Amino acid sequence: MYRPLADIIRPTSLDDIIGQKHILGTASKPGVLRRIIESGHIPNMIFYGPSGTGKTTIANIIADKTNRRLYKLNATTASISDIKSIIEDLSGFTGLNGALLYLDEIQYFNKKQQQSLLEFIEDGRITLIASTTENPYFTVFNAILSRSTIFEFKPIEESDMIYAVIRAFELARTEYSREFIIEDSVAEHIAFACGGDVRKAINTVELAVSSLQGDVVTVEDIRIIAQRSSMRYDRDGDAHYDLLSAFQKSIRGSDP
């Protein structure tokens, strides 16, 4: 079965995670989220941040380290019946540590759908890890917020992105069983063009190698493949108001 390169390279331990040092820290100096995971006492959590920053990966690691069954739903397609199916499945589940529900894009659940989770969160049958790319204080209802700890995931810094890109090219050599040369500045260009999204960067590497003619990955190839702007923008979210604020300050020269 075909597995995307991004799935093959997905970290299986906290030490392999790219970025998020502000919440994970290091093995010698652990951050808050790492300490919570290592304690084994997992609260309901909301992971808030851009795509490709490790939210799903960390949820997988939490399930593995705490020996819990992990259910995954995407709120763009899931319904209340999917939640009920999970609860029915849990009735025959004998695991002592309960189950984790990873609900991706929770902002697409309406109020009734989010409220349907409360009963199962409160009685401990489900520990919720929800993710969202939008500010949860605007998109997640208070009943869920009050029962959850929010962790903000930040875009991956360029130096970390370059490391991830180089690692992906090395893995691609093995997976595709071929040798190739990477032109100077290719890794830097991918890191910049993908705007802090590791998944997009690795997908770019995979496409560059799979479509390679000859034995050189060129900057020109990467410009064509990764042509989406690295700028984040949304019409009514944080990025919109951040850009508007920056524009206003530029006009007045930062003079109030």
Image (cartoon, grey):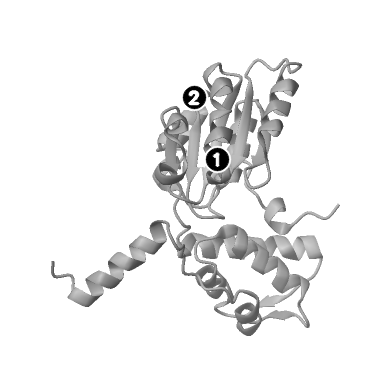
Q: Which image quadrant is residue 64 in?
A: top right
Circle 1: residue type:
Asn
| Residue 28 percent coordinates (x, y) | 43, 37
Left or right of residue 157: residue 87: right
Q: Is residue 25 visible?
A: no
Circle 2: residue type:
Ser
Residue under pointer 1: 110
Q: Which image quadrant is residue 206 in?
A: bottom right
The outermost residue toward the left is: 256
Callout 1: 10 Å neighbours few (<14), some, many (20+)?
some
Point 67% across, 68% down: residue: 205
Q: Is residue 110 visible?
A: yes
Q: Nearer the viewer, mark 1 or mark 2?
A: 1
Cβ–Cβ under 8 Å for marks 1 and 2: no
Q: Which sits in the foreground, 20 or 139?
A: 139
Left or right of residue 214: residue 62: left
| Residue 85 percent coordinates (x, y) | 73, 27
Left or right of residue 242: residue 216: right
Residue under pointer 2: 39
Callout 2: 10 Å neighbours few (<14), some, many (20+)?
few
Q: Is residue 89 above or below residue 145?
A: above
Left or right of residue 12: residue 247: left
| Residue 25 percent coordinates (x, y) | 42, 42
- Indicate the secondary structure of the residue bearing disc 2: helix
Point 61% across, 74% down: residue: 226
> How many tags in the picture?
2
- Calculate the distance from the C-alpha at mark 1 to the C-alpha at mark 2: 33 Å
Q: Which image quadrant is residue 163 in?
A: bottom right
| Residue 212 percent coordinates (x, y) | 76, 77
